[in-house]
Amino acid sequence: MRLPCHLYYNQLSSLPSEIGSLTNLQTLDISSNKLSSLPSEIRLLPKLEKLDLRGNPVPIPPEILGSKNLNEKPGDVKEILDFYFRVQDPSETELFYEAKFLIIGEGGAGKTSLAKKIEKESYKLQSDEKSTQGIDVIQWHFTQPNGKKFRVNIWDFGGQEIYHQTHQFFLTKRSLYALVADTRTENTDFYSWLKVAELLSDSSPVLIIKNEKQDRQCEVNDRSLRAEFLNLKEILPTNLDTNRGLDKIKENI
C-alpha cells in the first residue's frame, strides 16, 4: 500500500523528529510552508520516493528542489537530502561536479535566448520570446575530458526594473556570471551591472556577452572595464539567431 502525506500550504515551520518512524511513507508533500530546516530522522525513511520542499526557505537551491511549476515532479529525493545534510556538516568533503552560472542584464537583451541556446544549440529563437518573470533555472549537462559528468545550473534573471532589487538575494559567491548586452538598444550600463556582480559575488568571474542582433556591432570600452573590474574575464560577441560565436561562449564557460 502506498502511503502518501500531503501537508502543503499549512504554515509549518518545523517537522518533528518522530517523522522517522513512518517507515512506510512514500510521498511527502510539504511544499509552500515555512520550513528552514529538516530533522535528521527524515533520512530514515527507506521507502520515500517523492519529497516536495518547493516554496520553503530551506537552504537548498531551486534547481535541486525541482521545477518551480508545482504541477511538475519535484527533484530527486536522494539528491535533495544529500545536498541538505552535506551543507549542514562542514566536515564532509566530496567532489561536486556542478556549477552555478548566472545570466544578468537588461530586459530583452537576450538572456533567455542565451540560456536556451547553451542548453540546446538547435533551439529556434521565437520572434515573440517572452521575457523571464522572476528567475528560471535551466540545467546544462556535458561530459568533461576526464569522463566525469558535469552539470551547469543556468540562472536566467528577469531584467525588468521591478526585479533588480531582488537580485541581491540570489547573486552568490563562487559562481560564474554573464552580462548580456543587446546591440540594438545599447542601453546596458556596463559599469553598474559589473559593480553589482563584483560586490555581491565576492568578485566571481564575469563574461560580457554582446548579443549582436542583425550582426550590428556593439562597442564596449574594453580597456576601461578591464582596468576597473579584474574579475572580467572575456568580452564575447555572438549572434544567437545564427549561433555565431556560441561555441566560443560555451568553451569559455
Image (spheres, grey):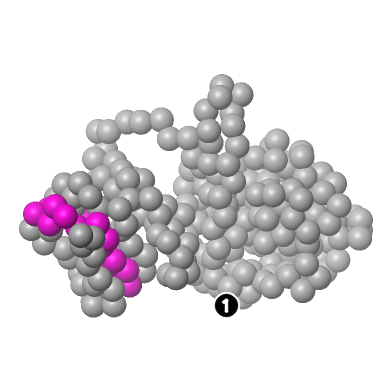
Position of residue 160 relative to residue 239, above or below, is: below
Q: Residue at x 29, y 77 (%)?
A: 9
Residue 158 placement: quadrant = bottom right
Residue 189 placement: quadrant = bottom right
Furthest toward the front, the residue is 1
Q: Tell me if 235 is positioned left or right of 100 in this view.
A: right
36, 25: nearer the viewer: 25
Q: Is residue 117 magenta?
A: no
Residue that carries the numbered disc 1 in the rendered image: 162
Q: Residue at x 35, y 31 (%)?
A: 94
Q: Quadrant of the N terminus?
A: bottom left
Residue 135 placement: quadrant = bottom right
Position of residue 36 relative to residue 64, above or below, is: below
Q: Residue at x 56, y 22 (%)?
A: 146
x and y, in percent, of residue 98 in the image: 49, 40
In the rendered image, is residue 62 in sight? no
Residues shaded magenta: 20-40
Q: Identify residue type, mark 1.
A: Ile
x and y, in percent, of residue 142 in the image: 60, 37
Circle 1 crowding by C-alpha within 10 Å: few under 14, some 14–19, many from 20: few
Q: Is residue 24 magenta?
A: yes
Q: Tell me if 142 is positioned left or right of 173 in this view.
A: right
x and y, in percent, of residue 150 in the image: 53, 36
x and y, in percent, of residue 253 in the image: 65, 40
In the rendered image, is residue 243 in sight? yes
Label 1: which secondary element: helix
Q: Main secondary structure of the magenta part?
A: loop
Q: Residue at x 59, y 46 (%)?
A: 140
Position of residue 209 relative to residue 164, above or below, is: above
Position of residue 23 relative to residue 169, above or below, is: above
Furthest toward the top, the residue is 146
